[in-house]
Image (cartoon, grey):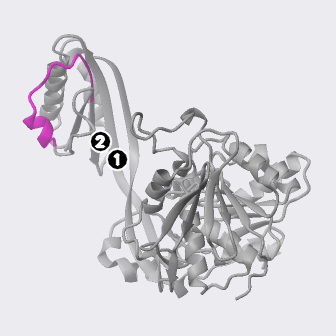
Amino acid sequence: MTPSHPSPLLIGCAAGFSGDRVDAAGPVVDTLIARGGPAFLIFETLAERTLALAQLRRRADSGAGFEPLLDDMLRPVLARCLAHKIRIVSNFGAANPLAAARHIQAMAAGMGLSAPRIAVVAGDDLSGEKHGPLLRAQLGAAMDGIRKVSANAYIGAEAIAAALDAGAQIVVAGRVADPSLTVGPAMSHFGWRADDWDRLARATMAGHLLECGAQVCGGYFADPGYKEVPDLHAVGYPIAEIDSEGHCVIGKAAHTGGVVSLAGVKEQLLYEVHDPAAYLTPDVVADISAAQLSQAGPDRVALSGVRGHARPASLKVNVCHEGGWLAEGEISYAGPRAEARACLAAEVLRRRLPELALRVDLIGALSIMGDDTGRLLADTPAGDARDVRLRVAATHAERAQAERLPREVTALYCCGPAGGGGVRTSLTPRLNTLSCLVPREAVPLRFEMLEGVQ
């Protein structure tokens, strides 16, 4: 197929998760403007738990449920993006994409900007009662007795591409698959078919490299003396240059820290990929078993050799449900025999709370390498650490039972070993997840412009 637009496409990513840095977009947009040509800015802000928490916020407030940092992320760059025809695609709609779109519309009006054309991608949310039979058909008895918070399908890029084809300047989605934020713009720009498997797979892996933001530019990569990353405090965010065949070069925003290196891109390429020959996405099954990476210049790495196969017949669905309560408590011990005193405090809690399965960590002595059952801690004699913070956690279906742990940790002030202080406690609702596959045709997708349904 002859692409309708032979010019390369630039896609910059300004967020890799909800809570990411809100000043990331500025340098990315500056770079896209300086380089010129067709460009998109994407924000990837969703994870499984993020979406369930957004559903809880929407329950409490029908106008909430989208990315809490939407204003901080978008406001600083919105005017420049619109002025320079940089289109924006994001899943920061979370549990309430329509409310997010209306919020952006109001933001633009408040800034004195012309009303942008905003599209909302819908169809991923299967939380409603009408979808109950579909979920039960897949999950069966696992649905018995649970209190569902959310159910969302991982949808693909087609609705995003259709919205862009219809002239959307901003596309707001909920649970689209992370790489699809890149695939949709590429499909629209180059005119690819939905079964153009090789090109879709290449764009998918470009999106896979972009989706975690700074991670491909040295974030989550630096290891002093082993993997050096310059100016990590000012790490840049990535920009992919994609050609009409889907091949890409990964770079980063100009005048920022970090590094785009072969080693770093290899790590990100393999991130969350269980089978390099069959990376399953809603758009395509990507095959990177023969992929090649090459340094294309300073902070530029080229990816080639990606192949694609027909997309799966099913879509993944995550069902989040209420999972009881998580109770936590911490107290510090310092000075001679601090570790032994912390161990004694943990033993007091075990004896006082026999009905709770306690997770015990001795921060400063044994924590990250420990285990929930406490076997390693039990087999390790108390050492001579002089600065130890005891952390104890437990879960329980009943709030009243979970509340006992914070109370008992607080009581250690006067009822526990010598010298304890700095108590902090918390009690938070837990969310559990069930996953299943549903037939693709059971999840009809659409996009909606704010001024009407397309």
- The reply to whether the magenta stretch includes residue 377 is yes
The quadrant of the picture occupied by the N terminus is bottom right
- Whether residue 350 sits left or right of residue 286 in the image: it is left
**Residue at image location 45% in from the left, 81% down from the top:** 438
Q: What is the number of the mark on residue 402?
A: 2
As drawn, 94 above or below 355:
below
Rendered residue at 24%/21% (across/down): 412
Give yes or no for residue 396 being in the magenta stretch. no
Magenta range? 374-390
| Nearest the eye: 204 or 365 | 204
* Mark 2 element type: helix
| Residue type highlighted by circle 2 | Ala
- Identity of the residue drawn at 77% across and 76% down: 6
**What is the quadrant of residue 10 in the picture?**
bottom right
Secondary structure under tag 1 reads strand
Could you tell me residue 88's position as x and y percent?
Answer: 74, 60
Q: Which of the marked residues, 1 or 2, is nearer the chain's N terminus?
A: 1
Query: Circle 1 is placed at which residue position?
Result: 325
- Residue 162 vertical placement versus 271 (above, below): below
Q: Measuring 91% from the left and 47% from the top, which residue is drawn there? A: 112
For the residues marked 1 and 2, what is the alpha-carbon distance in whole angstroms?
A: 6 Å
Spot occupied by residue 261 in the image (x, y as percentages of width and height): 52, 50
Q: Where is residue 288 in the image (x, y as percent from the top left)?
A: 46, 72
Q: Quadrant of residue 147?
A: bottom left
Q: Do the residues labelled 1 and 2 touch (CB within 8 Å)?
A: yes
Circle 2 packing at 10 Å, graded few (<14), some (14-19), many (20+), is: many
Residue situated in front as seen by the camera: 273 or 35:
35
